Image (cartoon, rainbow, N blue to C red):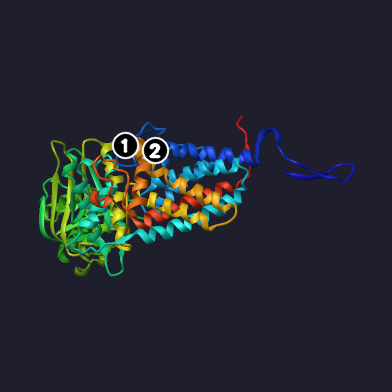
Amino acid sequence: MALAFDEFGRPFILIKDQEQKTRLRGLDAQKANISAAKAVARILRTSLGPKGMDKMLQSPDGEVTITNDGATILEQMDVDNQIAKLMVELSRSQDYEIGDGTTGVVVIAGALLEQAEKLLECGIHPIRIAEGYEMASRVAVEHLEHISQKFEFGTTNIEPLVQTCMTTLSSKIVNRCKRPLAEIAVKAVLAVADLERKDVNLDLIKVEGKVGGKLEDTELVYGIVVDKDMSHPQMPKQIENAKIAILTCPFEPPKPKTKHKVDIDTVEKFQTLRQQEQKYFDDMVQKCKDVGATLVICQWGFDDEANHLLMHRNLPAVRWVGGVELELIAIATGGRIVPRFQELTPEKLGKAGLVREKSFGTTKDRMLYIEQCANSRAVTIFIRGGNKMMIEETKRSLHDALCVARNLICNNSIVYGGGSAEISCSVAVESAADRYPGVEQYAIRAFADALDSVPMALAENSGLQPIETLSAVKAQQIKENNPCCGIDCNDVGTNDMREQNVFETLIGKQQQILLATQVVKMILKIDDVISPSEY
């Protein structure tokens, strides 16, 4: 852009490459932005709730993903529009922070923008709408605090945690065996949780999948499962009370750093070289034996000769184990990762009660289970399923369940699901609108209407009459003053979510409302879009 003056000294602006740029200003820009964001929200609207549909996405290289998880759908979708990208980031930030509710947050944002569009057409200034939304979101978040309930759980009483995880899993493809999966998720989180500090490190939970078997065969292993087998087929398949040496140095003779050549012109010289190599290997294996190791796990490979020697010396070994897995094995067994053979000492060995190799089905697939570890703070969830897509989707569903269990350990407040919290907030925000004079009250009422979009979508996806069902539930909530009435998606016959055991985490719901409001405010404040036009 350049500033120039005409002959009367009046400034005017030159825009470079003007014919190649498109420019939207004022209301047009806002409407274009709002319609882009609404388009994204409309895609996710149908996958909300227990009866929500799944989406099938094909990546450019032909890989197919079938998923119900909002964040995954948007990540995989190739979105060009900048405002639609904001929606993708909105769902991603909900995923990073809370892990669950990624679909709902986009639906709320889409509904807020839809309401904002009506207000803009009435001639209300976008900043006033944004301020009204901000006030309304504060009211809603406080109201959520007010209707939330704390529940107590301990290492023995895990039922409340399981119930909340089941709510999360009920909208996924795995809902037919949500009970066992929810229990697995809760036990895994409790195994690695630090209950005094109310902190959970989800990196300690490894989720591993293998095609074959059925979903019901999914199991929780208090230890580590590694997708490797013993380096020599004749090594023992089961080791009890194993002492594990975890090495990151290769089992092979040192290569000269500089480019030297070794000229061998007689047989004797070749023999001495070979003996030298063999002695080197011998020393290595002997060092591992001397410190008392009964299993060697190595990040690198070994020569066949080393393998042969290890086999003869009865020292089972596993090679090519990845760095992340090595760290988890070290955490689980209480061992140290040893970078050089010279540093091997008995204190640095990890201990495990049982190391076994397990083979699956008729294929030659084998995996190594390291169980009964000294420090069982690292666990593995081992998923089985009919096909690869099923396993990937189960991993994503379990990730949501693990995040919900973690959030409950950090903050044990819950609100009731099934759209009941949103309806209750909507009623509260509606009544709060009367306290605000000025134009903002229109925006606050619009916020209340937008909150109804979640229960409305739930009813729609469940095949109920959306408006009738919503108004009936809302009337019941106001009449009985009971914030637990929600949409009866599964046709149980009661609207009370306490009886249906549908819970959601309080921080998850609050985060949804706050994030959606922030993004909507940002979109409303844009009034000029200059973009390069397509050639």
Check the image and name the residue furthest to the top.
535
Q: Indicate left or right for 185 with 145 as reference.
A: left
Q: In the rendered image, which quarter contains the C terminus?
A: top right
Q: Mark 1 points at which residue?
A: 462
Q: Is residue 188 toward the left or the right of residue 80 in the image?
A: left
Q: Residue 456 versus residue 15: which sits nearer the camera?
A: 456
Please count the marks in the image.
Answer: 2
Answer left or right for 292 relative to 74: left
Helix, strand or loop under label 2: helix
Task: Between residue 371 and residue 39, name the one nearer to us.
Answer: 39
Amino acid identity at mark 2: Ile
Image point 57% across, 53% down: which residue? Answer: 440
Question: Picture coordinates of residue 166 (x, y %)?
Answer: 25, 49
Position of the N terminus, as image quadrant, is top right
Q: Position of residue 305 (x, y in %)?
A: 19, 49
The residue identified by callout 2 is: 467
Question: Rounded to the nearest whole Å, what is the CA distance between mark 2 and mark 1?
Answer: 13 Å
